[in-house]
Amino acid sequence: MPDCSRRTLLGAALALSACATAEPIDPLAGTEWRRSDDENAAPHFPTLAFTERGASGFAGCNRWFSAVTRDATAMQFGNVGMTRMACLAESQAATERNFSDVLERTRGWRMENDELVLLDEAGAQLARFVRNS
C-alpha cells in the first residue's frame, strides 16, 4: 500500500476515534426558558437559563441560581440560592413559592412540542416552559 494511503486511513481512524470519545453535547446549555403553565404567575413568569453546569433565572420576585446535574432524561437542581428582596404582592410570593417547590422536586425532564417539561420522581409533570426569545 502506498505511504499516502496509510496516512489517509490513519487520519480517518483518528478522526473517528475523536468523535467517539468526545463528550455529548448538552442540548440545554445556553438556552433560556419562561414558565408557561402557571396562569397565576402573570406577569411575573419564572425563568430558567441553563449553562453547562448550572442554571439561574427569575423566580417571580427574586433572582435564583443553582448547580444542576442532568443527563438525557434525569435532572436535579442542587441547593438553590436566591436573592432576598421583599415580594410586595402576594401573587409574586405565591409564584415564587410554587416555582421553588418545582425546582426542589425536579428529578427529570423531556422536550415536548418545543417545550421544556420538568418532571417529578414518578415522571409526572411539575412545570412547562417555552423558549425565551
Image (cartoon, rainbow, N blue to C red):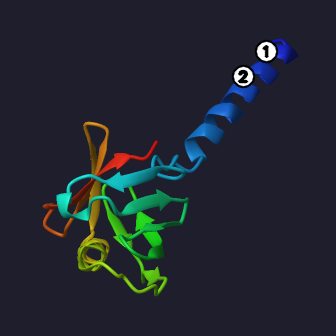
Q: Which residue is mark 2?
A: 9
Marks 1 and 2: in contact by CB < 8 Å? yes
Where residue 47 sits: x, y (%)? 40, 60
Q: Give the quarter of the image for residue 70.
A: bottom left
Q: Would residue 107 appear left or right of 87 to someone viewing this image?
A: left
SS at mark 2 in the image: helix
The N terminus appears in which quarter of the rendering?
A: top right
Horizontal relation, residue 82 to residue 102: left or right: right
Q: Quadrant of residue 89?
A: bottom left
Identity of the amino acid at label 1? Ser
Q: Nearer the viewer, residue 66 or 39?
A: 39
Whether residue 59 is visible to the viewer of this picture, yes or no, is yes
Q: Residue furthest right?
A: 3
Residue position marked by numbered label 1 in the rendering:
5
The location of residue 16, given as percent across then percent down, is 62, 33
Residue 61 percent location from the top left of the image? 39, 74
Q: Tell me if mark 1 has few (under 14), some (14-19) or many (20+) residues whose alpha carbon lies within 10 angstroms of its own.
A: few
